[in-house]
Image (tube, rainbow, N blue to C red):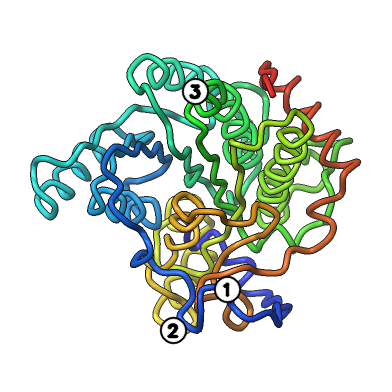
Amino acid sequence: MISQDLCFTINRNKTEMNNTNQFGKKGWTPERIGDLTGKTFVITGTTSGTGFEAARILLSKGAKVVMLNRNPKKSEDVITTYKNELGNNIDVSNITIDLGKLASVRKAAEEVLKTVPHIDALMLNAAIAQVPQQVITEDGFESQLGTNHYGNFLLQGLLFPLIEKSKGRIVTVGSMGYNLGIRTIQFDDMNWDKNYSPNGVYSQSKLAQIMTVYELQDRLKKAGKTDIKAYACHPGASRTSLIKTSGSLMTRFIWQIMKLTPMVQSAERGSYPELMCATEADLDQSGFYGPTGRGYFKGPVGECKLEPHAKDKEVMEKLWEVSEEATGIKFQV
């Protein structure tokens, strides 16, 4: 995803891995993807940005793509765009979902389970970012945590039986912003009633998403379900519209300027990490993947350093329990 890494870009974390990229100097690229005929990918947030590009590339390789988007009209326009470029025979459809509303997530998941017999990868790409003022969802959650974490947590849980049956993958698009907040989960005030800040809560929501990936890995391993994979990645700083749709006026202004600089890459390149995690054979789940250049803004796609607090086991376990209770879903791992 995109400009969701604006806060990361501004604060510039210079921590980098010294390891040689396992995919060579150019890093991972979609050239590594073979024929995907017969494969099905379910992707959230494809009407613009990295999600749009990821779906387009998968379709170009022969895959079936089920888009999960909030805006039906925009989804229809995107499908028309894809068909104009790739031909009318591509297999693409849309199911309406609002990740900020648990009822909508349940309804969308029910439709997926009824109409999609197989899922090779569920790609959790959609997010909101830097919401200027505290907004509480209809379910009683702070909006960024409610959309980015709780909505995605419920979606994963509801679709997990089908993913398990398919021996598929779950790919979570996180953000380097996970490393800019309080570096733990604020369990005593999950809605941030006392200290709300746009970047702070965004960071919290991305940390929660990333922690969920590694806790799910642990639970799958303990259950002996090694055929199911879960991956975490980040898009770097990419030219998309995420900040435009939810950020403050000042944040949007700064981002529009930054998009004109060499620090920011294209949305297409921002989609590479999630595509890699969805398609690359034998990719190590323990890694955290994204652009590996200076500050992790852009550059060859490969493994990035993940700070230890993102794998704090005690916090991960508590977050999982809190999330199951909040969403009413019990993962059948």
Which residue is pictured at 57% across the width and 30% down the height?
156
Question: In x, y percent, where is residue 121?
Answer: 46, 40
Which residue is pictured at 42% across the width and 60% down the height?
271
* Residue placed most toward the observer, 89 or 175: 89
**Which of the labelled discs sits on residue 199, or is there none?**
none
**For numbered disc 1, what is the local secondary structure?**
loop
Q: Quadrant of the C terminus?
A: top right
**For numbered disc 3, what is the local secondary structure?**
helix
Give the residue pinned by disc 1: 22
Task: Please say if 143 is above or below 6.
Answer: above
Callout 1–callout 2 Cβ contact below 8 Å = no
Callout 3–callout 2 Cβ contact below 8 Å = no
- Mark closer to the chain start, 1 or 3: 1
Q: Mark 1, residues whose alpha carbon is within 10 Å: few (<14), some, or many (≥20)?
A: few
Give the residue pinned by disc 3: 162
Which residue is pictured at 61% across the width and 52% down the height?
232
- Mark closer to the chain start, 1 or 2: 1
**Residue 296 occupies which quadrant of the picture?**
bottom right
Question: In x, y percent, where is residue 6?
Answer: 56, 67
Q: Amino acid at mark 2?
A: Thr
**Residue 20 occupies which quadrant of the picture?**
bottom right
Question: In x, y percent, where is residue 88?
Answer: 8, 42
